[in-house]
Image (cartoon, rainbow, N blue to C red):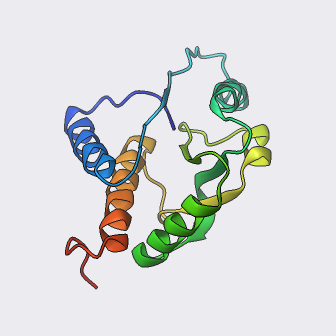
Amino acid sequence: MAVGKITAKNLQTGIDDYTERIKRFMPFELRIIPDIRTSKKTTAIAQKETEGAAILSQIQPGDFVILLDERGKELTSRQFAEMIEKKSHEVAKSLVFIIGGPYGFSPDVYARANAMLSLSKMTFPHELIRLFFTEQLYRAMTISHNLPYHHD
């Protein structure tokens, strides 16, 4: 799940490519929370709260929620693959990864999260994180299926 649309067509093309590749291995859906209409008077806190309510409305009881957040745990690609494999057998419903908007997550979203994962200590635009994440999820699938995509 991610907040906002992608404006760069080349990024969307890459995300679509990895999304189709992931679907060869597992059910996968990238849900988009629509951009929140803002004005000059809209504060970052208000935007996070509105986005947070929209995010929480999409989460079901039993979902295992992982926020992609710079303060989250960093994993290698192999560790990420192991985590996906383990959680896919443990989770009652769905494994839900969430990419927030430009200001991050509301306190309510943080409270609902079961875990946080960081793709880097650096800060990236949330549009790029979608491409990075879908590539890493595809990489995890190829690692789990012993395919030659990943090289150590």
Compared to residue 26, the image places residue 136 above or below, namely: below
Q: Is residue 128 left or right of residue 119?
A: left
Q: Can residue 7 be seen in this view?
A: yes
In the foreground, 13 or 84: 84
Quarter of the image that includes the C terminus: bottom left
Image x and y of residue 107, in percent: 78, 41
Q: Residue at x 55, y 59 (%)?
A: 88
Compared to residue 22, the image places residue 109 above or below, namely: above
In the foreground, 60 or 127: 60
Compared to residue 1, the image places residue 25 above or below, namely: below
Q: Quadrant of residue 10?
A: top left
Image x and y of residue 54, in percent: 65, 25
Counting the numbered discs, the total is: 0
Q: Residue at x 40, y 73 (%)?
A: 77
Image x and y of residue 68, in percent: 56, 53
Q: Residue at x 40, y 54 (%)?
A: 133
Q: Quadrant of residue 141?
A: bottom left
Q: Can residue 121 be seen in this view?
A: no
Q: Residue at x 42, y 45 (%)?
A: 125
